[in-house]
Amino acid sequence: MAESPRTPGVIAGRLDAESLQSNFADLHGPLDSHEARVAADRCYFCHDAPCITACPTTIDIPLFIRQIATDTPKAAAKTIFDQNILGGMCARVCPTETLCEEACVREAAEGKPVEIGRLQRFATDTLMSEGTQPYTRAASTGKKIAVVGAGPAGLSCAHRLAMFGHDVTIFDAKEKPGGLNEYGIAAYKSVDNFANNEVTWLLSIGGIEIKQGQALGQDFSLSDIQNQYDAVFLGVGLDGTNKLSVDGASLNHVTDAVEFIADVRQSKDYTDVAVGRNVVVIGGGMTAIDAAVQAKLLGAENVTIAYRRGQENMNASRWEQDLATAKGCQILPHLQPSSIEGNDSTSSITFEYTVTTPDGLKGSGETVTLTADQILMAVGQTLEGQPDGIVLTGGKIQVDSNGRTNIDGIWAGGDCATGGDDLTVTAVAEGRDTAEDIHKQLSVN
Amino acid sequence: MADLTTDFLGIRTPNPFWLASAPPTDKEYNVRRAFEAGWGGVVWKTLGSEGPPIVNVNGARYGAIWGADRRLLGLNNIELITDRPLEDNLGEIRHLKKEYPDRAIIVSLMVPCEEQAWKDILTRVDETGADGIELNFGCPHGMAERGMGSAVGQVPEYIEMVTRWCKENYNKPVIVKLTPNITDIRFAARAAKAGGADAVSLINTINSITSVNLDTMSPEPSIDGKGTHGGYCGPAVKPIAMHMVAEIARDAETSGFPISAIGGVTTWRDAAEFMVTGAGNVQVCTAAMTYGFKIVEEMISGLSDWMDSKGYQNTSEFMGQAVPNVTDWQYLNLNYVAKAKIDQDSCIKCGRCFAACEDTSHQAIWMKEGRVFEVNDAECVACNLCVNVCPVEDCITMEPMAVGETDPRTGKEVVAEYGNWTTHPNNPSVSEKA
């Protein structure tokens, strides 16, 4: 093999296929049935359990764990799916360390929570591996609903609407359904094409048609679907990205981290994915971590995450930060980019140190320059385009507690809408609850 | 370090840990390994009369129930007495006893209920130099159907009769092993004593079916689709065994009668508990079958450390210490009042105490804002359920109320005087007398 981590430039094939395969293996392997029963036995079956409250989809966690402990994992899966039809993906990508597992009383007691995420995966994998759909559609209502976006919010909404007997059409801009589950999550969190398989399984309830390559505002307008459907749900996500406004930001190999993540996920062969020798990722959220870790796993020699505030302010959980450092990435807090140097392509990036003052974050005047042949920007995502007539708040679609927008007949949920954190599990909850409201509304009319 | 040497019926062994008559003591190979591991003695697997060897099933002999992580909590078995030739067993006993003179070898016996059958085998056993015999009146499966084992142990007259035959025909210690599959263990123990036995050992295994296979509808262990009851043993039976040992220890007729305790002894602590409840030593089986003979090292070190911490020099110093405290319900002090107390610092807010009390007991625990759980003394009857379901040791405790305090539940003052049911005004027999 000619290439190595030390080969200059942005190139593919820094590691051999075998190393890459092992690097991108399942981050948390599945539990086998004995391990699952042992892990399940640690659950105390708390009264009014704090983990349930901590789950954005309010899964009855003690009940599903007891169902695993008593050797009925499919019943456990049903308990999960009743609340969260994307429970399989959430088991893989939820930051459980800041949700259910943080609330687990055993975390308080001994710093070792019940492995709720892995148990949820065990249950959902067991049922999904049979390929059967546990839900059936109610008798057809004849109502037609348009869902825009086949991400977690849209899919969750569509499934619940299908259960009620409505006919759903999903319009999705991408080539494949799944949204961030398909394009935006580190590959080692969703191996074996799980996101795609999950969508196929979810759709097996029937009554849901997906149209790919259909972008709102380009291929159809909001008024088109408003006219043709009884209700509209917008779950378009945040497809735009913030850019750096510093000199040199337009040089080659200065790109969006989300694009890099999507490229890794969509690659058939990791030896084809190009990565720099010295990669700098700018940002402090999950996107920054996912991009940095994967750059390292692809064979980059040095990967640095630069974040403008303190490490404690990063949106990525401590657990995710530790994952990055354990994989060999370096996290440098209190650095804001001031310029990118290079001829055609980036060769280095200069940061100014920051200090937190009563007036906010300020540059200290001191700078540092890092060698960088690849720079990945993970400085936030935005709503791309404003749907006609829809009111935004803080750059997101403004919705009430039922997911209703300012326009009658149009609902929204997930990352594109106000309310809740930008998490898969939150999007699922919003999609589900909005479907309930849409159904209620359509039943009245 | 404390001296674990134990004298039981004049048989001195380096420690009170014997292996019970069971599969682990079926032959020289196992027993030698046991002695090398440090066991104080063995009761050899039960011998039967001379003749065609015993036949066992050729399928599963054991069934089990498990706790978390497949920790074995209870085991049952349908194995019969030894299926090896009598002569082989006797020869092995003879030369092992010579080789390990400081260890006890007791020979367990089960022959038909005829005096001649017992005479015959006793002569043979005597020749081995074994330290004594144990009469298997407990085995609940298989042999009982042939009028032996628990079929004898369930009839006190038979116990007395066979024991007397043995005492008349054998001049070393005779231990009578009792079955728990009986209404009142004291009658069996009294019969053994009346027959002249030197000691009783108990409990033998309990009639049991561990589980049923819901696909085949066969009880486990399954032999070609059918199952039968087996003898239950292991940690799960310890409370039953301990009650029976205590009943014999405190019975006026058998008080002071030597007892070798058997039933779920798994750790040094179990052994110590049995011994303070009246046993002179303990016999172990399931724990060894689960973990191997090496566990005796923990039993030795654990008992020795505990004795050191309490200042006991010799095992005889603590034997029976708890017996006076085992009493009838009617003598419990009804003037003693306790209340549950939850230590908020160690509480992990799981709420199990609340669920248990609210759903199934006395509604004496409040769940307050922020998952703070507190006891309502006005409702708490000190039942101890919250203590038992709490996953944190010592988080909830039962605190006795001081004399002179008023119990908010009853409005009555706590008094220093002892008062039990026999003198309680609500007792009809008390009011009749009045």
Image (tube, coloured by chain):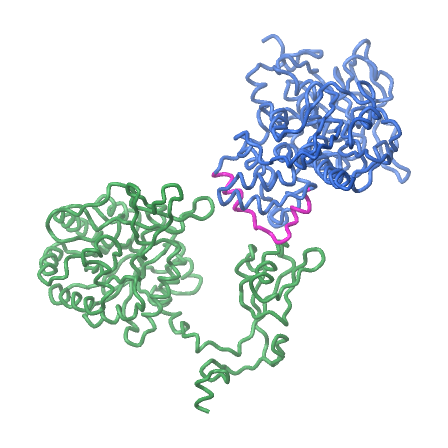
Chain colours: A blue, B green
- Image height check: is A103 above or below A90? below
- Image height check: is A418 above or below B66? above
Residue at the image position 36 percent from the left and 46 percent from the top: B290
- Where residue B213 sits in the image (x, y, percent)? 38, 44
Image side of residue A6 versus residue B205, left or right:
right
**Residue A78 highlighted magenta (yes or no):** no
**Residue A39 highlighted magenta (yes or no):** yes
- Where does the N terminus of chain A fall, quadrant-wise? top right
- Where residue A335 sits in the image (x, y, percent)? 81, 28
Image side of residue A120 versus residue A180, left or right:
left
Residue at the image position 13 percent from the left and 56 percent from the top: B125
- Where residue B242 sits in the image (x, y, percent)? 37, 63
Front position in the image: A17 or B96:
A17
- Where does the C terminus of chain A fall, quadrant-wise? top right
- Where residue B97 sits in the image (x, y, percent)? 18, 52
Magenta span = A34-55
| Count of picture labels | 0
Residue A353, picture quadrant = top right
- Image height check: is B115 above or below B417? above
